[in-house]
Image: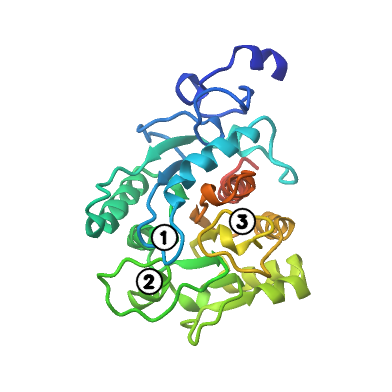
Amino acid sequence: MALEDAKSEVDLAFTRADRRGLAFENAFGGATSFLRRRYSKDLSGVDLAITGVAFDQAVSHRTGTRFGPRAVREASALQPFDPPYGWGYSPLEELDIVDYGDLAFDYARVADFPDALSAHIRGILAAGAGTLTLGGDHYITFPILKAYAERFGPISLLHFDAHSDTWVDDDFTRIDHGTMFYKAIKSGIVDPATSVQVGIRTHNDDFMGVHVIDAREVHETGAAAVVAKIKDIVGTRPTYLTFDIDCLDPAFAPGTGTPVWGGLASWQAAAILRDLAGISLVGGDVVEVSPAYDTTGATAIAGAHVAHELICLYGWTRRRA
């Protein structure tokens, strides 16, 4: 069946009739959308909207993550042929998923960007869909969380990163990818007592009450222990998962703006994400993929795999019994 479909399927980003189903279009051809989902602004009956935010004007070091959404979409063309390994169900066949395209914003009016992104996410949530956002630098999570907190109240944040991004910054007009979770906690939109940061390996004097599972603890205790600890902390509360690709060691994801040695291996991240099945995931993002710093494409591939796992997590509590 797959071979026959491969002979006829092309440009499924525009031509597919059904929002559900695997895809057998040649991975090396056709128009790229995330996992060959159909581009659509119609959210009627949609479970999950994939959206890109090509913004990197909040970085403290290397720019380039504005090209992340495009690279992750292209890398995802390797994945929609089969159900994801180890999950026991096929989210692309059970969920109505669309690629909602990218956020439109004026790059020269940076101060207007946060409200534009919050409004973009707010509109998707109002239609009854969840969001999976492809970044972009990590600042984008802050405006997204504002929209989520309006709908769910203070959110439990599950944050994979090399950096805590809670450095002190009481100037709320500043747009900075290293201070936005300080502001999110100060604003009351994130509940630190039920939030967790995984993979941290940079110093901060104050983690703002967030539970930290640093990279060394992941290495020494193992994925199962990490998952058990996370589930104990977040419980059944509405949880938003943000994955900065620099959570992975630069050996696995060199294409990022602020790489730090000693990070998670890709297999560790895969095992943790898989075993988080059952948490009440309401949305998520994958950020800081900067393809220009990785000639192999491995970082974008990792980002696409993380995003696919987030779809699996989102669908786990919504799948057919």
With respect to residue 20, does 55 lie above or below? below
Mark 1 residue element: helix
Q: Earlier in the sequence, mark 1 or mark 2?
A: 1
The residue type indicated by label 2 comes to: Ala
Q: Quadrant of the N terminus?
A: top right
Residue at the disc numbered 3: 254
- Rendering coords of residue 139 (x, y %): 40, 62
Q: Earlier in the sequence, mark 2 or mark 3?
A: 2
With respect to residue 22, does 226 lie above or below? below
Q: In the visual, does 319 lie left or right of 168?
A: right
Residue at the disc numbered 2: 184
Give the number of the mark in front: 2 or 3.
3
The residue type indicated by label 1 comes to: Thr
| Mark 2 vs 3: CB contact within 8 A | no
| Mark 1 vs 2: CB contact within 8 A | yes
Structural distance between the alpha carbons of marks 3 and 1: 21 Å
Q: Quadrant of the C terminus?
A: top right
Q: Residue at x 49, y 25 (%)?
A: 31
Q: Which one is nearer the viewer's eye here, 58 or 98?
A: 58
Q: Which one is nearer the viewer's eye here, 14 or 72?
A: 72
- Rendering coords of residue 47 (x, y %): 47, 41
- Rendering coords of residue 163 (x, y %): 53, 71
Density class for disc 3 (Cα within 10 Å; few <14, some 14-19, many ≥20) is many
The answer, for residue 320, to whether it is visible in the render is yes
The residue type indicated by label 3 comes to: Pro
